[in-house]
Image (cartoon, rainbow, N blue to C red):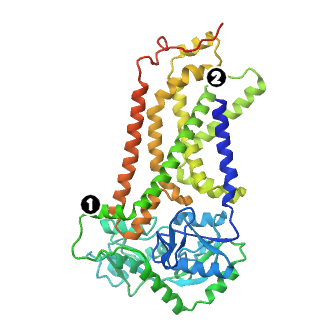
Amino acid sequence: MKKVLMTLLVFLASVFSFGQIVQADDHYLRVGMEAAYAPFNWTQDDKSNGAVPIEGTTQYANGYDVQIAKKIADDMGKELLVVKTSWTGLIPALTSGKIDMIIAGMSPTEERKLEIAFSESYYTSEPVVVVSADGKYANATSIADFAGAKVTAQQGVWHVNLLTQLLEANIQTPMGDFSQMRQALLSGVIDAYISERPEAMTAETANSTFKMLTLDPGFEVAESDAAIAVGLRKDDARIVQVNDTISKMTHDEQVALMDDMISKQPMEKNNSGEEPSFFSQVLNIFTKNWKQFLRGTGMTLLISIVGTVVGTLIGLLIGVFRTAPKAANKALALAQKCLGWFLNVYIEIFRGTPMIVQSMVIYYGTAQAFGINIDRTLAAIFIVSINTGAYMSEIVRGGIFAVDKGQFEAATALGFTHGQTMRKIVLPQVIRNILPATGNEFVINIKDTSVLNVISVVELYFSGNTVATQTYQYFQTFTVIAIIYFILTFTVTRILRAIEKRMDVDTYTTGANQMQIEEVPHV
């Protein structure tokens, strides 16, 4: 037990100490973006067309935002490094010091200005509407033509404010990103979504089932919404250098650069007259992108395996402690009680809050509040481990209480200490009894790693979503992801059942009168 405890202490200490290696290097300019919002930014497998590396991966980012970031980095004498982060994680990543700037097609809205500072505009967007080319609203020309239409926009961006101008439309709940909205439009869940001209042109070019509409009369847009600017921390003096770089570009140069990026973005057009079968498309996506899927799968397995093992050890330690008898010494009894209260708070918090919230608080919150800069992979393992530990502690406690009380009494009569009783008599039975629940936690962890994209962890779901934004074949891509998840969980389930079967030997039973005690101390 002491060895297990020391292992856990070393693990927890390494998370915080090793995290310092990701402290921002003066040699790099770390820029945050989704790398999944073409033509502003996207992910590709090589450095062609001026692409730059994505931190922590073997992939590269390119697009209009990347080229602007390169100009800024060159003027500062730094090397550009892209930090791939989900949209909701960009501002927390900036304010916590994980990145130096946000260059991700972000508009300087009044709400965002309360949190961060913005540079001068480096592009001005024009709002448009994307519909199905063969849908009911394909010929709409004005806002009034969308009466009764199911329309949405991306959550957290200025497009959401435009929904209120569609007075007769059936406004839908805003969605997380453009890939979700495109998928919803393809499936008929929505009739249209609000976008910007570059993104809409990309969608229309990549897939002939999409159609971009420029409305007249159109949307009334505030200048601060239509503009796109670089986001920096409020105390960052480099905003002067950023504005100086942006001022060197004329409007015509901005338009020319955007057109160039639209022509260079990697995408598979779907305009052929003969449509391949669904399964042929699925196979084609997997064949061309298997490296991305493999990398994401490897990260998912690493986090879920280590997190489950460490979490189970945490649960065993807590379970043993919470069932220990009260100490005779008053000081030790008080310390035992205080630690019990702390463990109860820990268990209730981590069982009662979503893992995605825990991820944001632990990864970004610790950096912003305490200056602790944790490596994202270690942070992910730590988050999954302590989350699993909270659940496993209750499972272990139930497993201990399920052991017949007569066994505890017999061990006490034979002179066993509480630790000996647990190690030699109770825990072997508990481990066997909780094995199915442990396997269930493992399966849950495999699936729950998908929320870790908010802290820039490129796991299976994040990798697959990137492929979907490149191919515009959402059903096919997510079918591949679903198959991989199923293979992982099915394999894990079968392995654990084989282990359970192997442990079900004739000489082992949980009955108090039938259990064989290997070592009996002299009394």
Q: Residues within 10 Å of mark 1 (few under 14, many from 20)?
A: few
Q: Disc number at residue 279? A: 1
Locate the C terminus and report the quarter of the image it occupies. Answer: top right
161, 71: nearer the viewer: 71
* In front of the other: 352 or 384: 384
Compared across the picture, whether 415 is left or right of 332 comes to: left
**How many circles with numbers are drawn on the protein?**
2
Q: Residues within 10 Å of mark 2 (few under 14, many from 20)?
A: some
Residue at image coords 38%, 84%: 214
Q: Amino acid at mark 2?
A: Gly
* Percent x, y of residue 278: 26, 63
Q: Residue furthest top?
A: 523
SS class, disc 2: helix
The quarter holding residue 129 reads bottom left
Residue that mark 2 sits on:
419
- Residue at 52 percent across and 55 percent down: it is 452
The answer to whether residue 390 is visible is: no
> Which quadrant of the structure image shows residue 6?
top right
Q: Position of residue 234 (x, y in %)?
A: 69, 72
Give the vertical position of 479 relative to 203 (above or below).
Answer: above
Q: Which residue, as the protein is rendered here, is positioned at the far left?
A: 274
